[in-house]
Image (cartoon, helix red, strand yellow):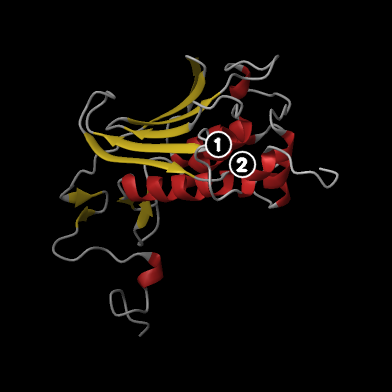
Amino acid sequence: MDGVLTQAAPVLYGKKFLADYPQCLLKMGRFRGTEVTGEIVDNRQEHVNAFAMVRQGMAFLRKTMPLGARFPKGEIFREDRFPVPLEALREILLNAVMHRDYSHPSGYVAIAVFDDRIEVSSYGRLPTGITVKKLSGEHRSYPVNPLIAGAFHRTGAVEVWGRGTNRVIDVCKQHGAAPPIFKEQQGFLVVTFKAEMVAEVKEAESRGQLGAKEAPRRHQVGTKSGLSRD
């Protein structure tokens, strides 16, 4: 700012964080069962900048969530889908990275995947005047870190109108997923998506038994693995 580096600069663009910025930490874990005391299937901790947190967090979720399929009504093509829409997860992860409290060296952003839910946690409390209840309704935008939020806004990743959580709820409803649950817990804001995270093999789809060959996806039509164009 005015030719002088601010604390937001290393948070946004830094490459080395230990030992000066240990709070630039993303924790990612896949737990078997429904409790944090369950077996850890995958455990990662990365000290990275804010943009990398979003990229790596979304990559972890894509890798960890089971990919299911359904046949939309009136369609002959199978539609692959995750139990929680990626757009909703991305918005919540962006908010977690942008609006968390970076002042405490022990702070972090965490993604925990259990058999029955996904939890995205970020260190820091909500701004004065904003409650977890208001996050599910109309509310104004109060960026805790305006320089960090501004940088993400300039990339086109986010708006600045306080509509993000409302959009997440709408996207979940359109997807057929449960809306997120917001809560404050021991200095963290925790967003929970309730959904089945264990892949299940089903012998019959909504259109009947598929047999040895799967129904083609829309993008496979005209390819060797799908239907011919003739």
Question: Amino acid under label 2?
Answer: Val
Q: Quadrant of residue 192?
A: top left
Sort mark 2 into few (<14), some (14-19) or many (20+) by Cα contacts within 10 Å: many
Quadrant in the picture for the N terminus: top right
The amino acid sitting under disc 1 is Tyr
The one of 161 and 43 positioned closer to us in this rendering: 43
Give percent across and percent down for residue 168.
55, 36
In depth, the one of 225 and 72 nearer the eye is 225
Q: Quadrant of residue 163?
A: top right
Q: Are marks 2 and 1 in contact (CB under 8 Å)?
A: yes
Residue nearest the viewer, comparing 142 with 71: 142
The answer to whether residue 31 is above or below residue 181 is: below
Q: Which residue is at a point 31% across and 76% down the rendered structure image?
A: 227
Relative side of 168 to 178, left or right = right
Single out the mark in the foreground, 2 or 1.
1
What residue do we see at 50% from left, 18% from top? 183
* Label of residue 11 in the image: 2
Question: Which of the marked residues, 2 or 1, is nearer the chain's N terminus?
Answer: 2
Which residue is at a point 59% across and 23% down the rendered structure image? 136
Report the quarter where the C terminus lies. bottom left
**Residue toward you, 20 or 13:** 20
Residue 185, horizontal then vertical, whole percent:
47, 15
Residue lying at the far bottom of the rendered structure: 230
Q: Secondary structure at mark 1?
A: loop
Residue 179 visible in the displayed image: no
Q: Residue at x 43, y 30 (%)?
A: 178
Question: Element under label 2?
Answer: helix
Residue 8 in the image: state x and y as whole percent.
68, 39
**Residue that badge 1 annotates:** 21
Q: Is residue 73 visible?
A: yes
- Marks 2 and 1 sit apart, C-alpha to C-alpha, by 8 Å
Vertical comparison of 77 with 186: above or below: below
